[in-house]
Amino acid sequence: MQVKHQARITWAMAALALALFLPVFVLKTLGPFDFWWWMAGNASLLMLLVAWIDADWRRGFLLDASRGLWWKILLGMGSAALLYAVFWLGNLFSRQLFDFAGAGIDQVYGLKEGAGVWRMGLLVALIIGPAEELFWRAFLQRRLAEAHGPWLGLVLATTLYTGMHVASLNPMLVLAAGVCGVFWGLLYWRFRSLWLNVLSHTLWDLAVFLVFPLV
């Protein structure tokens, strides 16, 4: 009975995440909230709920920070750089191979318009980047892996994470989400470190959107 209850909570949270984020990629703005405010608000809500319902997540959050932090920082920086290199090459070749690639990539960067570099940077660094890993990998992938095994857990979490971006109707964004989902899913599966994933994701976000944009 307890296992079924936990499974219902896991899938209910997955459904809530999709319900929260699918409209963001469809509408981009909600009244006075632009894409980045809306993403940050949804991410904050999910984090509060996860912290409330999952004691293992709370314990892992504190325990992981106390073990091998410097090693995780170095690996987080290296993995972010590796993923950025993958995207740099992908940007180079996709623009040459696919007619729709340039427009799709430009559409993603169009979300920056009017956001302000400092506001966007702070929201990405402090809320959006960390929250995506703390939810999709440290909560959802972990619980799905516990219920269905590590590989199926990774596949299910990555599929949901990628599927969330389908609402954008931008094939380049969906492809990017799929690559990132697999990369960070494997990183979490291999090292089981939420802080490592948070650092990797946040540094990559800042690099690809603000520091070294691919446009």
Image (cartoon, grey):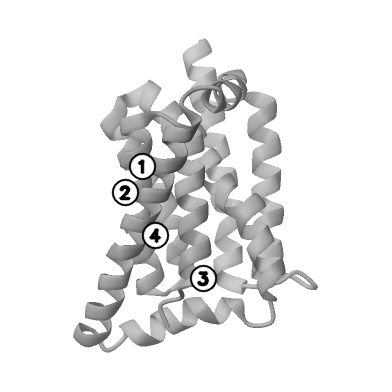
Instruction: Using the image, determine if residue 7 lies above or below residue 114.
Output: above
At 71% from the left edge and 37% from the top edge, which residue is drawn?
48
Question: Looking at the picture, which amino acid does disc 4 mark?
Answer: Ala
Can you see residue 48?
Answer: yes
Closer to the chain start, of discs 2 and 3, is 2
Closer to the chain start, of discs 4 and 3, is 4
Distance between the Cα atoms at labels 1 and 2?
5 Å
Select label 2 or label 3 by which is in front: 3
Distance between the Cα atoms at labels 2 and 4?
9 Å
Residue 185 — which label? 1
Question: Looking at the picture, which amino acid does disc 1 mark?
Answer: Gly
- Picture coordinates of residue 44 (x, y %)? 69, 46
- Picture coordinates of residue 34 (x, y %)? 70, 72
Instruction: Using the image, determine if residue 112 lies above or below residue 195.
Output: below
Of helix, strand and loop, which one carries label 3?
A: helix
Mark 1 touching mark 2, by CB under 8 A? Answer: yes
Mark 4 touching mark 3, by CB under 8 A? Answer: no
**Residue marked by disc 2:** 182
Of helix, strand and loop, which one carries label 4?
A: helix
* Crowding near the residue tagged with mark 1, few <14, some 14–19, many ≥20 C-alpha atoms within 10 Å: many
Distance between the Cα atoms at labels 1 and 4?
11 Å
Distance between the Cα atoms at labels 3 and 1?
24 Å
Q: Is residue 62 left or right of residue 141?
A: right
- Picture coordinates of residue 149 (x, y %)? 30, 25
Distance between the Cα atoms at labels 4 and 3?
20 Å
At 46% from the left edge and 75% from the top edge, which residue is drawn?
213
Mark 2 touching mark 3, by CB under 8 A? Answer: no
Residue 211 — which label? 3
Can you see residue 140?
Answer: no
Distance between the Cα atoms at labels 2 and 3?
24 Å
Instruction: Using the image, determine if residue 182 lies above or below residue 145.
Output: below
**Residue marked by disc 4:** 177
